[in-house]
Amino acid sequence: MGFFFIVLIICFVLFLFRLYHVAKDDAVLVKKNISLQMVFDSAFFVGLVSLFTARLFYVLLNFDPLFLNPLAFLIFPYFPGLSLLGGFVGGVLALYFYGKRRRFPLGRVFDFYTESFGFVLPIGLVGYFLLSGDFSLGGIVKLALFTIIALALNFYFQPKARSLEIKNGTISILFLIFFSLTMLLTCAIDKSGVSNFISNKESLIYSSFLILGIIIFIKQELIRRKNPKSGK
């Protein structure tokens, strides 16, 4: 099970590589006097928080008396189980509070993280499938959709964000919407029956994310149309 940990390390290194690429010499960061080193420091903090919350959510959603042992909870390579939902929630909250404290341009930095996370997500899923042997229909659909999302983020939206053609934070909001839709779709495929899907805790959370993302996107678009120069 230690191979799962190796996959995580590889994904984190690739995440940092992509984060460096998108944040390097960014005009908005330079204007705000935010160094690349500060962004990299935030990545290690956010990564640790995401890892902890990924483990915490997995334990809460798949409780086993074994996890009452602190060692079983902490040594996840030998007692495997991480929640993508938990890591996502923890990462968003950690970056928000860390960014507020460091006075980051939050919309801009969230977009950098989104592009980097989207870049490594399909790679992490491939590693998971190869090590677990779980080639379910839902998993294959998830990999295909996240690959499409990663390509759109990094080859269509990222150049537009770089040139300030789109409002800061738009990439992150769109990713929240399509991430939630993808997870809901694959949950529906994996859960047999409508009642099982509706009663699934993760489905309810992703539905809330989807609604929240749509509301934020509509609000931001209304602001942009009233003031086209806002947020750029």
Image (cartoon, rainbow, N blue to C red):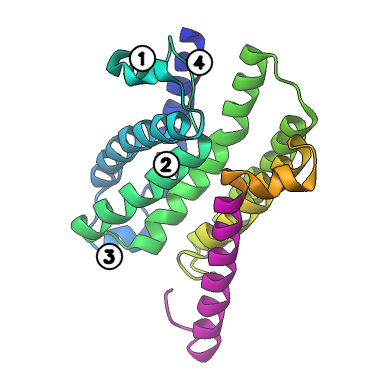
Around disc 1, counting alpha carbons within 10 Å, would you say few (fewer than 14), some (14 to 19), or many (20 or more)?
some
Residue topped by disc 1: 72
Tell me the distance, in whole angstroms, between the alpha carbons under discs 1 and 3.
46 Å
* Camera-nearest label, 4 or 1: 1
- Of marks 2 and 4, which one's residue comes earlier in the chain? 4
Asked if residue 148 can be seen in this view, the reply is no
Q: Residue at x 46, y 43 (%)?
A: 88
- Tell me if residue 215 is in the magenta stretch: yes
Magenta span of residues: 204-232
User: At numbered mark 2, what does the secondary structure look like: helix, strand or loop?
Assistant: helix
Residue topped by disc 3: 31
* Camera-nearest label, 1 or 2: 1
Name the residue nearer the viewer: 202 or 104. 202
Please give left or right for residue 199 compared with residue 3 in the image. right
Tell me the distance, in whole angstroms, between the alpha carbons under discs 2 and 3.
18 Å
Tell me the distance, in whole angstroms, between the alpha carbons under discs 4 and 3.
40 Å
Which quadrant of the figure has residue 70? top left
Label at residue 4: 4
- Of marks 1 and 3, which one's residue comes earlier in the chain? 3
Which quadrant of the figure has residue 144? top right
Label at residue 19: 2
Tell me the distance, in whole angstroms, between the alpha carbons under discs 2 and 4.
22 Å
Amino acid on which disc 2 is placed:
Leu
Name the residue nearer the viewer: 218 or 231. 218
- Of marks 2 and 3, which one's residue comes earlier in the chain? 2
Quarter of the image that includes the C terminus? bottom left
Q: Where is residue 134 shown, x and y percent of the image?
A: 70, 19
Q: Residue at x 41, y 29 (%)?
A: 55
